[in-house]
Image (tube, rainbow, N blue to C red):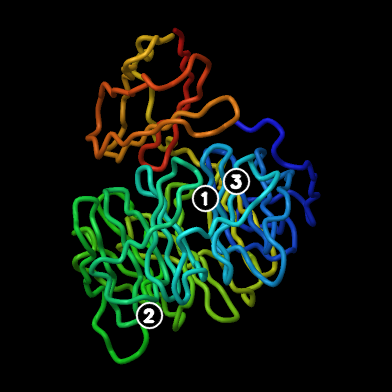
Amino acid sequence: MYTKPFFLLLVALLSSSAGYGQARQLFDTPVYALFAAGDTVYAATADRVFRSTDHGATWDTSGLVHQGENEVTDLFVDGATMYATTVVDGVYLSIDGGASWQAHHAGLNGLGARQVPMMARRGDSLYLATLGAGVFVKPLLPVMAPWVPFNAGLPWGTVQSIVHDGRGNLLAGAGGNATVSIRNSADNGWSEWAFDVFNGEINLFLNATREGNALLGAGTQGLYRSVDDGRTWVRFNPGIGLINQAAFTTWNGQVVAGLSKVSSSFLFTSADAGLSWALLDAGMPPTAPLFDVQSAGGALFIARSDGLWRMLAPVSTNSPRSEPQLAGQPFPNPASGGAVHIPVALPESSAVHLAVFDRQGRRVSSQDAGLLPAGEHRLRLDVQELIPGSYMCTLQAGGRQLVFTLQIMH
């Protein structure tokens, strides 16, 4: 999807290739955010974004995201369009795959509106959590659309986290009294739910991920599990004290939780959708804060203050996780307008999203198919507004991505 948007930079590993059971340091510059698209992984330092398509062996880098004392906090990549949020100066945008960047602050008004710890995508919209001005939203198209407040019913302006749970629910870590605010796509406003009993000590909702029917979360005082879409939660105490940052990913058939304290960090894994957790000894020094974890190409990437680390999965005799598959050829293809029908087989119940990119990697169309059960489906993709040419299409379902091409003719 990318041709030459990044400036090539081969980064040699500081140590030998990672062996099973322990992590290896890839480079020692602090890394603050990660993003994965299929087997491609992106890693953000304070002011640049690195990309690897070979499981971390070599990396290329973007242009300078911003100047001055500021750090990237989160990444989102949509074809050739890239978003990077920052600690104190809002959002930066690249429309050429990272070669150049520009400020994208339009609409971010209010105290704390440019202090952005996290963002999340739901359907065709992107959402921001801010430390003072609540939540903002914008459509992915047009790219330069401004940010708009999304705060109806939100009880707090300081929002530490924003997550889409894969079922249409947004979860916002608003306030520090052991509550999480939830808003479905059909809701007119946010509703507040307790994820723990407030004991008088601060308890922020830091992050969440979905594993099957279970919603797994992290707060200042532990890990949490919900099977009713965040209305009630059960706490698991990992025994490490207060947590100030958390990240989740799925790797090697398990959920991985990266938990960080002020001057140390830990990795925990769960093979039973959060019913139990085990400490993962990755062989890293324990005295560095952790900012993010992400899996790509079978490897686990760990972003910390002492750099980027990679851990390879051990050899397993288990079958790999099933992926969505084309159950036939999209029809018609080539298409002359109207709609294309795409037969798809889903191995499990998943929220399905279709996106169309032109040859420059720019998103030109997208639509949600909603939450679909496991089995075969016939999806309808509207292409009547596309000009003639070749397009790359992606179908995202259950954290996996299926890629295919379409031809549009007169």
Q: Position of residue 203 (x, y in %)?
A: 36, 81
Quadrant of res 130: bottom left
Q: Secondary structure beneath disc 3?
A: strand
Q: CA distance from mark 2 to mark 1?
A: 28 Å
Q: Nearer the viewer, mark 3 or mark 2?
A: 3
Foreground of the two, 407 or 242: 407
Three-letter code, disc 2: Gln
Foreground of the two, 28 or 84: 84
Three-letter code, disc 1: Phe
Q: CA distance from mark 1 to mark 3?
A: 11 Å
Q: Which residue matches tag 1?
A: 76
Q: Secondary structure beneath disc 2?
A: loop
| Earlier sequence position, callout 2 versus callout 1 | 1
| Earlier sequence position, callout 1 versus callout 3 | 3
Quadrant of res 333: top left
Residue 221 is tagged as: 2
Q: Residue at x 25, y 27 (%)?
A: 375
Q: Is residue 93 left or right of residue 380?
A: right
Q: Is residue 237 left or right of residue 84?
A: left
Q: Which residue matches tag 3?
A: 41
Q: Secondary structure beneath disc 1?
A: strand
Q: Position of residue 101 (x, y in %)?
A: 66, 51
Vertical side of 104 occupied by 314: above or below: above
Q: Residue at x 56, y 73 (%)?
A: 265
